[in-house]
Image (cartoon, rainbow, N blue to C red):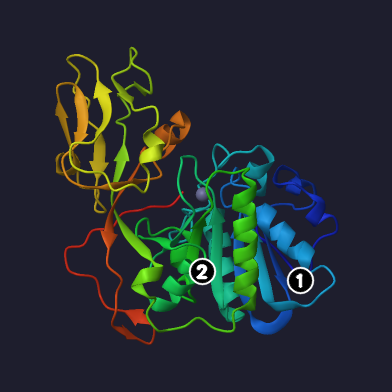
Amino acid sequence: MLNVLEQLPAGLLEREAHELHQVLAGPTLVHLPGRRAEPLLVTVLLHGNESTGWLALRALLGRYRDRTLPRSLSLLIGNVAAARHGLRRIEGQPDYNRIWSGDGMPEHAMARQVVNEMAVRRVFASVDVHNNTGFNPHYACVNRLDHRFLHLATLFSRTVVYFIRPETVQSLAMAELCPAVTLECGQPGQTHGTEHALEYLDACLHLAELPTHPVSEHDIDLFHTVAVVKVPEQTSFGFEPAASDIWFAPDLDHLNFRELPAGTVLGWVRDGGEGCLDVSDETGRPVCERYFALRDGEIRTVTPVMPSMFTLDQRVIRQDCLGYLMERYSVPRAHHEGQAEVLAPGVRQVQSTS
Ligand SMILES: [Zn+2]
């Protein structure tokens, strides 16, 4: 199902994300030559409604229309069909950022083919561009505490999130081959998100190599994801005091990336309601009590935490989750061949990508 091309199809750069289906039959990988042979892989639209990556890539390619690229560039344009309808994915499709390990669907084979193609071409680095729905800063995610990965991440933002679940995301598959990051560029449709991604991608094209020395502690705020928060399926919820079982603070997403003290109120529970949230760690163990308590109808934190990707989008909350909980992490120092020192035992990580 993957189209592989060696040049840009005519008219591609004139298309908006929802028009790409007019020139692309489906997921498409395009290899373009540049002065340095090992390509930068840029992936966009794994989620069809997250258009910032495409807008940035299109602008980047426009810059080099009549010039040689400083480095070869491979671009993967992911879920063209979902982008047509402005959806994360179409009903019946798997999530295109959950197909990068495992088997059983044509999309798994497609993802494997991309990885194989990029291995043959000795990929230099991989950047997968996303948006999210809540109020979040721009940040990069890494799946390895390797200094080359952290350099690639801090080139985008000093805020960096480390996670290793789920194992099915693109950046984790590419991490086997090269430094890889997932970019979170805020909400779709924001000009400064597109411009930030554009300048970042151009900077990546100009990198001769990624340093293996440690990133300075002054240059990075590193977090790791410790829990995912969901609303149980049978529980009704909203953002206004109403007939629902739970209602959350209307500015819940403004808590993202803020270090919350114990006792912070996130929401309220209907009289006589249980109001239990579904909070799990990376192994899927329920850990609600570790983070939240219900007192006098209020859902309060019981330990200092930092949320990320808390969203007000009710469909996202139902389909995916309310958000994640993170803890601050100190920068690894020791390194061998760019590989950072091993995590302290007992450290927990969960998924943290849109
Ligand atoms: Zn996404």
Q: Nearer the viewer, residue 79 or 250?
A: 250
The residue located at (33%, 21%) in the rendering is 236
In which quadrant of the rendered view does residue 270 lie? top left
In which quadrant of the rendered view does residue 48 lie? top right
State the residue position of label 1: 6
Q: Nearer the viewer, residue 68 or 49?
A: 68
State the image coordinates of residue 271 (x, y, percent, origin top left): 20, 14
Left or right: residue 83 compared with residue 237:
right
Left or right: residue 313 compared with residue 235:
right
State the residue position of label 2: 155
Identify the image quadrant of the N terminus: bottom right
Q: Nearer the viewer, residue 113 or 257?
A: 257
Q: CA distance from mark 2 to mark 1?
A: 29 Å
State the image coordinates of residue 330 (x, y, percent, origin top left): 27, 67
| Badge 1 element | loop
State the image coordinates of residue 194 (x, y, percent, origin top left): 63, 53
The residue positioned farthest toward the bottom in the image shown = 337
Q: Amino acid at mark 1?
A: Glu
Q: Tell me the mark number nearer the camera, choosing from 2 and 1.
A: 2
In which quadrant of the rendered view does residue 58 lie? bottom right
Number of residues whose C-alpha sits closer than 10 Å to that of mark 2, classed few (under 14), some (14–19) or many (20 or more): some
| Badge 2 element | loop
Residue 62 in sight in this render: yes
Tag count:
2
The image shows residue 292, relative to residue 73, as above or below, that is: above
Q: Amino acid at mark 2?
A: Leu
The residue positioned farthest toward the front in the image shown = 218
